[in-house]
Amino acid sequence: MAPVSNIWSARIASALCAASRWLSAGSLALALCAFAIAATRQGAGELALPALALVVALGAVQIYLAVRIEFDRAIFEASAGQPDGFAGFDEALQKLGWTRNASGGRPPEARAAGLATLVKWCGWLLGAQFALALAALWLLT
């Protein structure tokens, strides 16, 4: 059986994944609004249009991160209920050829730290999108 601290690390990481959906939703909403503004504004300005395009591009990056984080959520949830923790997951990755790490996996705390880094990137991207969207709106006036 996996140690209790490993089970809780997996549960906490899974909860972080679920909470990060708000960052992804906000990013998607900003990207869609920026796309709509860019599509409906003829002659939007030489600086406003690139800023809006960056908002949309950062939204695409955010979608990629959301997919990665959702994948991690499913893995962390599954590992919390497994007696061997991540051992079966690491073995399956090795058999699929999806990892170069032949010696086994990382501890759950290291996996959670990597996930937290992805979530932080989501927050930074959302902040950048928001700043660019405000700049574009200011340039449109």
Image (tube, rainbow, N blue to C red):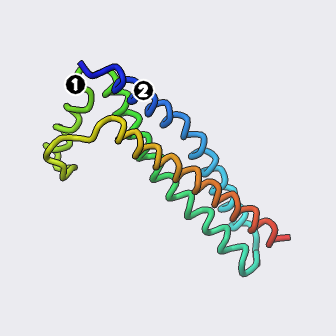
> Whole-percent x and y of residue 93?
20, 42
Direction right: furthest residue: 141
Relative horizontal placement of residue 73, taking residue 134 as reference (left or right) = left
The correct choice, above or below, for 92 with respect to 43 in the image is: above
| Crowd band around label 2 with a 10 angstrom C-alpha radius: few (<14), some (14–19), many (20+) | many
**Amino acid at the residue labelled 2:** Arg
Q: Name the residue located 50 percent from the left edge and 52 percent from the top edge.
A: 63
The correct choice, above or below, for 54 with respect to 26 in the image is: below
Which label number is shown at residue 11?
Answer: 2
- Residue 133 lies in quadrant: bottom right
Which label number is shown at residue 84?
Answer: 1
Q: Name the residue located 68 percent from the left edge and 67 percent from the top edge.
A: 39
Q: Earlier in the sequence, mark 2 or mark 1?
A: 2
**Amino acid at the residue labelled 1:** Asp
> Whole-percent x and y of residue 59?
56, 57
Q: Quadrant of the N terminus?
A: top left
Direction bottom: furthest residue: 46
- Residue 95 lies in quadrant: top left
Q: Name the residue located 65 percent from the left edge and 62 percent from the top edge.
A: 35
